[in-house]
Amino acid sequence: MTAQTSQASAGGSDHEQKRAALGYLHEAWAEARHEGIDGDCLAQACLFKAFAEFVSTYGEEAAATFAEGLAKRIRNGEFSLALARQ
């Protein structure tokens, strides 16, 4: 664990924790791809785990409401890496 991630996990700001979480996910993703796991399979597993976490934390209705807003965000390019890099 890097100093940055240990600081974030030790009670850093929400932004710092999100940055650390993305770092962990990036490392795990790269390792799984190196081991031959298909990207689509990884994406589906990540979505399942993420929504399971939302449901256990906020409940089914709040998670469903969040999910309803995803279509618009996807269509607006919020998750398109090519756009995010510009």
Image (spheres, rainbow, N blue to C red):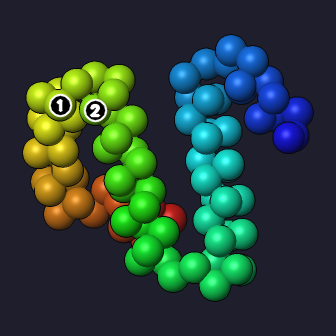
Can I make out residue 76 in this image?
no
Q: In this view, does 18 lie above or below 38?
A: above
Q: Quadrant of the N terminus?
A: top right
Task: Give SS at disc 2.
Answer: helix
Q: Which mark is residue 60?
A: 1
Q: Are the residues flagged by discs 2 and 1 in contact, CB closer than 8 Å?
A: yes
Indicate the quadrant where residue 52 lies: top left
Rounded to the nearest whole Å, what is the CA distance between mark 2 and mark 1? 5 Å
Of all residues, the one furthest to the top in this rendering is 11
Q: Is residue 53 left or right of residue 31?
A: left
Q: Badge 2 is on which residue?
A: 55
Q: Is residue 57 above or below residue 64?
A: above
Q: Is residue 7 left or right of residue 39?
A: right
Residue at the image position 17 percent from the left and 63 percent from the top: 75
Residue 48 drawn at (x, y percent): 35, 53
Q: In this view, does 70 lie to the left or right of 34?
A: left
